[in-house]
Image: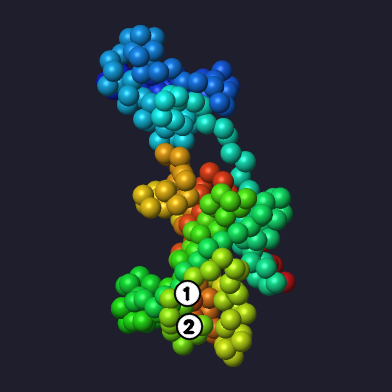
């Protein structure tokens, strides 16, 4: 490490190495700030910065009154993105495959399409849409967030509604309206979660999320689009790519 590097990086490097090579196994306590200052001959500020960096990297977690510990290495569960959505939602099928009980809560209401959503739905900005916000859980633990926007003409109701029952998929709802979905497109990117997302998903510091933009098409017309937020430390996305010979 270059001599010009901040002194706290020396602490980060050593503790990170011990975590990675197993010297400090999952659940092991991390030295306190006071212990770090004595062991590494650094100041209180450097010790505090070092612990903050390790927490942001997702290597340690802190609890009030109990200090920091090495974070348990999560097992990434598969989320299959290419599947017929009936009779159950893909989320329910993935949770059941992992021996977890799926539950969800949702609320729908009349809203206005912000610029990006309007572009995805080929609408004028701030056009009326039905917005549905959902929280998906496995064994009571929050696993996914989703905010969906659908055209008003296909909405089941423009009055605010909420529930804990499984909502019918966009495919079945559009088919019932005589507008069959012909294609589902997705784009995925990784980003830092917003504070409200971190709270709702109970994310440790340093964990990023997978952001899936999912749009349903009926021919050349987009009929629903969703923003799905998935904890990056809990899931891996699995895609099947058909090959046509």
Number of marks: 2
Q: Would residue 148 be visible to someone looking at this image?
A: no
Sort mark 1 into few (<14), some (14-19) or many (20+) by Cα contacts within 10 Å: few
- Coordinates of residue 119 in the picture (x, y in percent): 37, 75
- Coordinates of residue 104 in the picture (x, y in percent): 56, 61
- Coordinates of residue 23 in the picture (x, y in percent): 56, 18
Residue at which label 2 appears: 157
In this rendered view, identify the residue nearer to me: 212 or 29.
Answer: 29
When the figure is inspected, residue 98 is found, relative to residue 117, above or below; the finding is above
Query: What's the distance in space between the residues labelled 1 and 2, CA to CA?
Result: 8 Å
SS label for mark 1: strand
Q: Which mark is residue 199?
A: none
Q: Which mark is residue 161?
A: 1
**Quadrant that contains the N terminus:** top left
- Coordinates of residue 143 in the picture (x, y in percent): 55, 52
When the figure is inspected, residue 163 is found, relative to residue 71, above or below; the finding is below
The quadrant holding residue 11 is top left
Q: Is residue 149 left or right of residue 2?
A: right
Q: Write the residue at 68% across / 60% down.
A: 93
**Quadrant that contains the C terminus:** bottom right
* Contact? badges 1 and 2 (CB < 8 Å): yes
Q: Is residue 26 left or right of residue 50?
A: right
In this rendered view, identify the residue nearer to me: 77 or 238.
Answer: 77
Q: Write the residue at 62% across / 41% down.
A: 75
Q: Write the residue at 70% across / 56% down.
A: 96
Q: Write the residue at 50% across / 21% down.
A: 29
């Amino acid at each position: 490490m270059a001599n010009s590097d901040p002194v706290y990086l020396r602490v980060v490097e050593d503790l990170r190495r011990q975590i990675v090579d197993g010297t400090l196994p999952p659940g092991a306590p991390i030295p306190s700030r006071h212990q770090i200052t004595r062991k590494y001959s650094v100041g209180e500020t450097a010790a505090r910065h070092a612990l903050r960096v390790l927490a942001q990297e997702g290597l340690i977690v802190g609890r009030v009154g109990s200090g920091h510990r090495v974070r348990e290495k999560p097992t990434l569960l598969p989320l299959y993105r290419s599947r017929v959505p009936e009779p159950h939602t893909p989320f329910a099928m993935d949770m059941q495959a992992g021996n977890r009980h799926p539950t969800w809560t949702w609320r729908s209401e009349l809203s206005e399409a912000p610029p990006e959503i309007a572009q995805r739905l080929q609408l004028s900005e701030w056009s009326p849409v039905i917005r549905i916000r959902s929280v998906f859980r496995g064994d009571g633990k929050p696993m996914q967030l989703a905010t969906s926007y659908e055209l008003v003409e296909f909405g089941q109701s423009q009055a605010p509604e909420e529930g804990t029952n499984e909502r019918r998929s966009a495919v079945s709802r559009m088919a019932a309206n005589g507008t069959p979905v012909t294609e589902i497109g997705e784009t995925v990117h990784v980003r830092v979660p917003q504070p409200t997302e971190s709270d709702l998903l109970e994310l440790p510091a340093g964990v990023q999320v997978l952001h899936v933009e999912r749009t349903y098409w009926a021919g050349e017309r987009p009929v629903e689009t969703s923003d799905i937020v998935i904890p990056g430390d809990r899931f891996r996305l699995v895609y099947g790519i058909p090959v046509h010979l």
